[in-house]
């Protein structure tokens, strides 16, 4: 059986789909999976060994150039490519009108959430079969249940395994006990103050760990440089392709991150991961993993570096005590 997964974005949503793929890989070895995803996240999808072919869309880019002939040629090529693959089933794991329209291009039966379950009920008009999955469950569990219903099995929800493995990357000069500090995030109100990152790095160095950080834009670069200047043992990874950053994260000892997609990735790798949430609630979309923890800002909007590092130490001990 040949199945196409449609989950185009965002990074966290893509990562939340991995446990469902891993369930299916173990229970339905007769099923092969391809994936259709936003071009920016193709390297993330490639982390799961069960994914054969990755098709990319560029909805974010296409929206900015709807009248451009190149946009329509790219969309037409995607349609031809998907149809040529002759899928037996498409699972729209996103539940949005845009994802349903992408799924429709494959010319195969589409399974998805029903009207009471989908994020955009209008998407269900394009599905061939729909399933009810309670909306008050974490996104990971919702997707696992959807895959189980679509493929005819009951997922073991008592266990959680994303099944992803870090790809090889440029790890030159990065070794030992490293703590990746993921300070970059999309919204200003999600950002932990730079002085708190510096204090966290200092506390980690006192405990024999090497801080690692990186950046993807000029504002993030300024923060990374400030951390490295204050704590000279910090390794500052230059702006790099997402796959290379993922490789470094996957081989880290510990990850401390803001509310951002790469923090979800760390928890999916099964790493000790402390997520710092300042302006958002983890709710039904927060990081999940065997050694993942989320610290929420107090009423005064503060998360203390000492508390973050203490939680990181607790997770490291928990990992050491886990059965081999």
Image: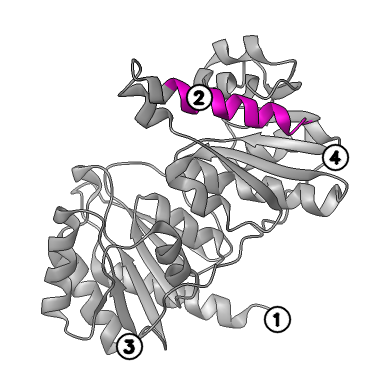
Pointers 2 and 1 in contact (C-beta within 8 Å): no
State yes or no: residue 73 in magenta: yes
Q: Residue 289: x percent and y percent?
A: 56, 59
Q: Split into 4 quadrants, where in the image is the N terminus?
A: top right
| Front position among marks 2 and 1 | 2
Tell me which residue sits at (20%, 53%) in the image. 217
Q: Where residue 277 sits: x, y (%)?
A: 32, 50
Residue to which mark 2 is pinned: 75
In the rendered image, residue 185 lying in the magenta stretch gets the answer: no
Residue identifier under label 4: 153
Q: Earlier in the sequence, mark 2 or mark 1?
A: 2
Image coordinates of residue 201 in percent, x first then y, are 24, 76
The span from disc 3 to disc 2 (Cα, nearest Å) is 52 Å
Q: Residues within 10 Å of mark 3 (few under 14, many from 20)?
A: few
Q: Residue at x 12, y 62 (%)?
A: 222
User: Pointer 4 and pointer 2: residues touching (CB < 8 Å)?
Assistant: no
* Comes first in the chain, label 1 or label 3: 3
How many other residues sit within 10 Å of disc 1, few (<14), some (14-19) or many (≥20)?
few
Given this view, does label 4 or label 2 mark the residue nearer the observer? Answer: 2
Q: Is residue 49 above or below residue 123?
A: below
The magenta stretch spans which residues?
72-87
Is 295 situated above or below 173? above
Instruction: Give the Cα distance between marks 4 and 2.
Output: 34 Å
Mark drawn on residue 207: 3
Q: What residue is rendered at 17% in x and 76% in y?
A: 228
- Residue 324 image label: 1
Which one is earlier in the sequence, the residue at label 4 or at label 1?
A: 4
Q: Secondary structure at mark 2?
A: helix
Which element type, helix, strand or loop, lies under badge 3? loop
């Amino acid at each position: 059986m040949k199945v196409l997964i449609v989950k185009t974005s965002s990074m966290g949503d893509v990562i939340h789909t991995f446990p469902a793929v891993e369930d299916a890989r173990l229970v339905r070895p007769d099923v092969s999976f391809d994936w259709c995803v936003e071009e920016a996240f193709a390297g993330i999808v490639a982390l799961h060994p069960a994914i054969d072919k990755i098709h990319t869309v560029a909805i974010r880019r296409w929206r900015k150039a709807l009248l451009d002939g190149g946009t329509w040629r790219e969309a037409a090529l995607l349609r031809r490519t998907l149809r040529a693959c002759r899928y037996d089933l498409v699972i729209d794991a996103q539940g949005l009108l845009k994802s349903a329209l992408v799924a429709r291009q494959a010319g195969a039966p589409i399974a998805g959430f029903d009207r009471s379950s989908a994020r955009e009920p209008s998407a269900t008009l394009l599905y061939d079969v729909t399933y009810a999955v309670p909306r008050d469950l974490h996104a990971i569990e919702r997707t696992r249940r959807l895959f189980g219903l679509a493929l005819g099995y009951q997922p073991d929800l008592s266990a959680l395994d994303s099944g992803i493995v870090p790809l090889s990357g440029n790890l030159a000069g990065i070794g030992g006990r490293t703590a990746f500090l993921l300070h970059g995030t999309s919204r200003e109100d999600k950002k932990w103050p730079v002085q708190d990152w510096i204090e966290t790095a200092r506390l980690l160095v006192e405990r024999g760990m090497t801080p690692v950080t990186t950046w993807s834009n000029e504002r993030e670069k300024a923060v990374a440089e400030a951390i490295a200047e204050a704590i000279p043992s910090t390794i500052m990874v230059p702006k790099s392709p997402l796959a290379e950053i993922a490789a470094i994260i996957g081989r880290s000892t510990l990850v401390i991150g803001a509310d951002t997609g790469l923090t979800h990735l760390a928890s999916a790798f099964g790493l000790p991961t402390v997520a710092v949430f300042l302006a958002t609630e983890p709710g039904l979309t927060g990081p999940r993993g065997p050694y993942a923890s989320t610290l929420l800002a107090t009423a005064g909007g503060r998360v203390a570096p000492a508390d973050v590092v203490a939680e990181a130490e607790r997770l490291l001990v928990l990992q050491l005590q886990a059965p081999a």
